[in-house]
Structure formats: structure tokens, C-alpha cells
Image (cartoon, rainbow, N blue to C red):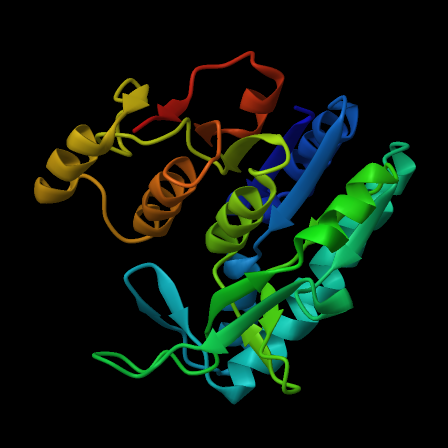
């Protein structure tokens, strides 16, 4: 099977121009088919603070009112996405920027109100596999922002980790997919204050124990949930760590069942 690398980048990497540029050079140098999914949540939070828009989070996920959605659409789908695409073109990577609404790439439904009203947040229901295959088979690298749509004209904010996992699962039937979650940490850490506390391997039993001990919480929870969902649905490998791990040169966390 043809190999595909699906890489999600976020956190401080998006915030730091030098770090982002180094990552994009590495991404462009990956041989074979590749897809990049990016967040930009810290940039959104900074702009929200400047504009006096409240920032509300629940279990590592953003509660999205109408004002916040307008801000997210402009930053994710505009500023961040197009700057990444332009940079990759400069590194001879033929990238194409996408939201979930483009070519009906990713559909979602507004998350139902249960214990928390997340506002304009989407839960993915459909990935247009044939569209992604068309792009990959024509040597294009999709650059996906964290926006989906509901097929009725509504843009929805959707967790970028979930988007990466969902695309990976959708393509897992036709490709050998490796999923990478890149951010500023070495991987999953026992303590963020101790750079020697990297957990290099996590399986479902270790994950359960780490959750019970509250070592894994907040922003890492979506990554871990999506990692196991991907592995249970046909994805070959999942790795979490600093962007340099895509070159295979540094230690990181590998997730297995």
C-alpha cells in the first residue's frame, strides 16, 4: 500500500515564525504523499483577548460563540492557512489550502447540548475520501485548517486533532497511514517541569492509569482520544512530539493499542 503521512501541527509552533518555518521545510522534504492539518488556537486566544472576546475552554476544547467563530474563520482559514501554503510553495511543495467546506471535504454536525453548550463546534460525520485521494494522486499536499461545515451553509469550529484523526481513518482503507501530532513538547510528559519525564510508549492500559493519576488532562486529552480512535480504525502508527520527530531524529511518544 502507498504510504501517507498525516501531520497535525499546533501549539507554540504556529506562534513562532522560526519554528514554523523549520517545520515547513521538514514537511516539504517528506517523500511521498502527505497532508498537513493545523490549528492556531493560541493565536485565536491572543486576538480574542485583544478584542475583548471571552475565551472559554472545556476539557481542552474551545466553546465557540458567533464572535469567536468569526475570529476563528479569519485566522484559521485565512491568515494561518494561506501563509503556510505560500511558505510551502516556496519550498517546492505543491500545497493546496482547505477548510472542510471546500469541495465538501469534511462535514460535521453542531455538537448537541448535553452537559456543556459548545456553541458553533462541529462533530465530524463525513470525510470526502475520494477528494483527498484525487489531490494526493495528483501530487498535491492538502493543508487543512480546523474548520468544517454542516452542508447547510454553516461553518463549524472543529478540533484539529480530530480532523487529523478522521482523515487518517478515512484514508486508512486505501493507504498505509502514519499519524503525527506535532507541538512544542517532546511528547507526553509525566511532568511539564521535567524534560526528562518523557513517556516514550503508551498503550491503552498505560493511558487509563495516566488519566486516573491526572497526569494526562486538558489539552492532551483530545490528542490521546483521537490517537486510540485512529489506531482502532485502520491507522498504522501514531506519534506525538516535537516537529523534528517527522525526520526520525529525536525521542517522542509512540501510541499503540
In the image: residue 39, left or right of residue 143 = left
Q: Is residue 71 above or below residue 194?
A: below
Asked whether 89 or 197 is in front, the reply is: 89
Q: Is residue 21 above or below residue 57?
A: above
Q: Where does residue 175 sit, x and y in percent of width and height?
A: 63, 32
Q: Quadrant of residue 151?
A: bottom right
Residue 141 visible in the snapshot: no
Q: Quadrant of the C terminus?
A: top left
Q: Residue furthest top?
A: 249
Asked whether 107 or 65 is in front, the reply is: 107
Q: Where does residue 166 sit, x and y in percent of width and height?
A: 51, 51
Q: Where does residue 146 sit, x and y in percent of width and height?
A: 58, 61
Q: Where does residue 246 sit, x and y in percent of width and height?
A: 59, 23
Q: Is residue 208 above or below residue 76?
A: above
Q: Residue at x 66, y 52 (%)?
A: 129
Asked whether 121 or 191 is in front, the reply is: 121
Residue 229 visible in the snapshot: yes
Q: Quadrant of the N terminus?
A: top right
Q: Residue at x 86, y 36 (%)?
A: 139
Q: Quadrant of residue 102?
A: bottom right
In the image: residue 45, left or right of residue 136 = left
Asked whether 126 or 74 is in front, the reply is: 126
In the image: residue 147, left or right of residue 202 = right
Q: Is residue 207 above or below residue 79?
A: above
Q: Residue at x 66, y 58 (%)?
A: 128
Q: Residue at x 77, y 66 (%)?
A: 103
Q: How many marks?
A: 0
Q: Quadrant of residue 206?
A: top left
Amino acid at each position: 500500500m502507498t504510504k501517507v503521512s498525516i501531520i497535525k501541527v499546533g501549539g507554540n509552533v504556529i506562534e513562532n515564525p522560526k519554528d514554523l518555518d523549520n517545520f515547513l521545510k521538514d514537511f516539504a522534504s517528506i517523500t511521498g504523499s502527505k497532508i498537513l492539518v493545523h490549528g492556531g488556537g493560541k493565536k485565536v486566544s491572543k486576538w480574542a483577548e485583544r478584542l475583548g472576546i471571552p475565551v472559554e475552554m472545556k476539557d481542552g476544547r474551545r466553546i465557540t460563540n458567533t464572535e469567536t467563530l468569526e475570529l476563528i474563520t479569519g485566522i484559521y482559514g485565512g491568515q494561518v492557512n494561506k501563509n503556510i501554503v505560500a511558505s510551502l510553495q516556496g519550498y517546492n511543495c505543491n500545497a493546496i489550502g482547505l477548510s472542510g467546506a471546500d469541495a465538501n471535504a469534511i462535514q460535521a454536525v453542531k455538537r448537541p447540548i448535553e452537559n456543556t453548550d459548545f456553541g458553533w463546534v462541529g462533530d465530524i460525520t463525513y470525510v470526502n475520501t475520494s477528494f483527498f485521494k484525487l489531490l494526493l494522486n495528483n501530487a498535491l499536499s492538502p493543508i487543512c485548517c480546523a474548520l468544517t461545515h454542516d452542508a447547510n451553509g454553516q461553518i463549524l469550529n472543529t478540533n484539529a486533532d480530530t480532523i487529523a484523526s478522521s482523515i487518517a481513518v478515512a484514508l486508512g482503507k486505501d493507504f498505509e497511514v502514519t499519524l503525527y501530532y506535532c507541538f512544542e513538547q517532546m511528547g507526553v510528559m509525566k511532568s511539564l517541569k521535567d524534560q526528562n519525564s518523557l513517556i516514550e510508549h503508551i498503550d491503552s492500559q498505560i493511558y487509563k492509569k495516566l488519566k486516573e493519576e491526572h497526569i494526562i488532562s486538558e489539552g492532551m486529552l483530545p490528542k490521546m482520544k483521537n490517537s486510540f480512535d485512529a489506531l482502532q480504525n485502520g491507522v498504522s502508527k501514531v506519534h506525538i512530539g516535537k516537529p523534528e520527530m517527522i525526520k526520525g531524529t529525536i525521542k517522542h511518544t509512540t501510541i499503540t493499542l
